[in-house]
């Protein structure tokens, strides 16, 4: 059901865990399946220098979180806010149609974490 790239990202996910001194944390739930994802970000001068995730989710959620956290490292927060689940799915060379909703978790959790960072700065 999953392509090789997705299977690899699921079998050896990158950035699993939680950044204890994170500057922003986002936790979101997937209304379709009830799975949960949390992303923590370390941000310096509005650039994401580290990103980690923890998820109670399926293989597609884990693969997309791994890929999304890799993609946002080095991005400014404005660039990261523009990252869409479609871009993450493209990076993974596709997901089965019934698993596209899983990729939305990472996009939403990153946005939440950036909002958390911005609120803390105020
Ligand atoms: Fe819930 Fe994939 S089935 S995130």
Image (cartoon, rainbow, N blue to C red):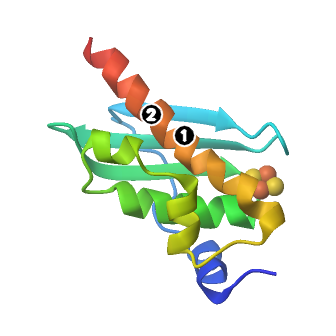
**Dividing the picture into quarters, in which one does residue 92 lie?**
bottom right
Residue 66 appears in the rendering: no
Query: Which labelled disc corresponds to residue 72?
Result: none
Residue at figure coordinates x 50%, y 73% from the top left: 91
Taking the image in four quarters, ligand 1 sits in the one at: bottom right
Please name whichever residue, 103 or 69, is drawn nearer the observer in this view of the structure. Answer: 103
Residue 24 vs 52, above or below: the answer is above
- Quarter holding residue 90: bottom right
Of all residues, the one furthest to the left in this rendering is 45
Which image quarter is the N terminus in?
bottom right
Q: Quadrant of residue 59?
A: bottom right
Asked if disc 1 and disc 2 are in contact, CB closer than 8 Å, the reply is yes
Q: Give me the residue at 64% from left, 73% from top.
A: 10
**Residue 113 — which label?**
2
Please tell me which residue is depicted at 31% across the width and 47% down the height of the picture.
Answer: 79
Please state, as top left, top right, bottom left or bottom right, where the C terminus lies in the image.
top left
Could you tell me residue 117's position as x and y percent?
34, 26
Residue 42: image location, x then y, percent:
30, 42
Closer to the camera in the image, 120 or 106 = 106
Residue at 64% across, 75% down: 94
Label 1 CB less than 8 angstroms from ligand 1: no
How many badges with numbers are in the image?
2
Position above or below: 85 against 77: below
Q: Is residue 89 left or right of residue 81?
A: right
- Helix, strand or loop status at disc 1: helix
- Which residue has dot 1 on it? 109
Q: Residues within 10 Å of mark 1 (few under 14, many from 20)?
A: many
Residue 45 seen anywhere in this rendered image of the structure:
yes
The percent position of residue 28, horizontal first and vertical second, equals 64, 35
Q: Secondary structure at mark 2?
A: helix
Calculate the distance from the C-alpha at mark 1 to the C-alpha at mark 2.
6 Å
Residue 24, image x, y percentages: 38, 32
């Amino acid at each position: 059901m999953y392509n090789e790239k997705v299977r690899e990202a699921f079998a050896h996910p990158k950035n699993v865990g939680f950044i204890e001194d994170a500057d922003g944390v986002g936790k979101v739930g997937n209304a379709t399946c009830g799975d949960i994802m949390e992303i923590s970000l370390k941000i310096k001068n509005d650039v994401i220098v580290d990103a980690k995730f923890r998820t109670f989710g399926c293989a597609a959620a884990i693969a997309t979180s791994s890929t999304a956290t890799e993609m946002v490292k080095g991005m400014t927060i404005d660039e990261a806010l523009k990252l869409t689940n479609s871009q993450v799915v493209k990076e993974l060379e596709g997901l089965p149609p019934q698993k596209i909703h899983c990729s939305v978790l990472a996009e939403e959790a990153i946005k939440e974490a950036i909002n958390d960072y911005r609120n803390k700065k105020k």
